[in-house]
Amino acid sequence: MEIVARWRRLSEERNLNIHQLVVELRGRQPLVGTPAQVAELIDRYVQSDVCDGFVLLPHLLPDGFDEFVDTVVPLLQERGSFRADYTGSTLRDHLDLPWPDGRSG
């Protein structure tokens, strides 16, 4: 319970809502800007192999991802940083992982 008390204290001291508290605790940088600016930043990280994915925390629920999906994802797909099509029918296929029994695809 010490962790909960510490988080509660931090939230109260800095007047943070739950979303802001999670961002603060995880040290994640917010992606803020126009869709083109956000896509540029994500693309730069992906293309330079700094990362291979992002954990997105929507600013609004339940519709917080809609604008991102509608405006940023198409830009990332154009740049080749976000898959547009899938070649297989399973996650294992999509990630090109071997099957435990040795079969492929």
Image (spheres, rainbow, N blue to C red):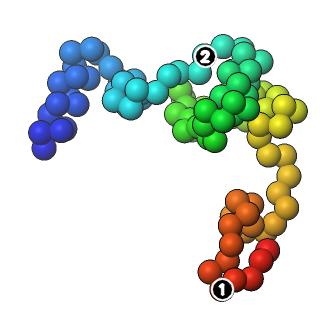
Tell which circle, 1 or 2, labels the residue nearer the N-terminal end: 2
Q: Residue furthest bottom?
A: 101
Q: x%, y% of residue 18?
A: 36, 30
Q: Amino acid at mark 2?
A: Val
Q: Residue furthest left?
A: 2
Q: Which mark is residue 46?
A: none
Q: Are marks 1 and 2 in contact (CB under 8 Å)?
A: no
Q: Is residue 58 above or below residue 101?
A: above
Q: Amino acid at mark 1?
A: Asp
What residue appears at the point 36 percent right and 24 percent down from the top-left corner? 24
- 5 relative position to 16: left or right: left
What residue appears at the point 73 percent right and 63 percent down from the top-left corner? 96
Q: Is residue 15 above or below residue 1?
A: above
Q: How crowded is the residue under tag 2: few (<14 C-alpha within 10 Å), some, or many (20+)? A: few
Q: Which mark is residue 101?
A: 1
Residue matched to label 2: 32
Q: x%, y% of residue 10?
A: 22, 22
Disc 2 element: loop
Residue 102 placement: quadrant: bottom right
Q: x%, y% of residue 86?
A: 82, 57
Q: x%, y% of residue 77?
A: 83, 37
Front residue of 91 and 16 = 91
What residue appears at the point 77 percent right and 40 percent down from the top-left corner? 82
Disc 1 element: loop
Front residue of 43 and 36 = 43
Residue 70 visible in the shown view: no
Front residue of 4 and 62 = 4
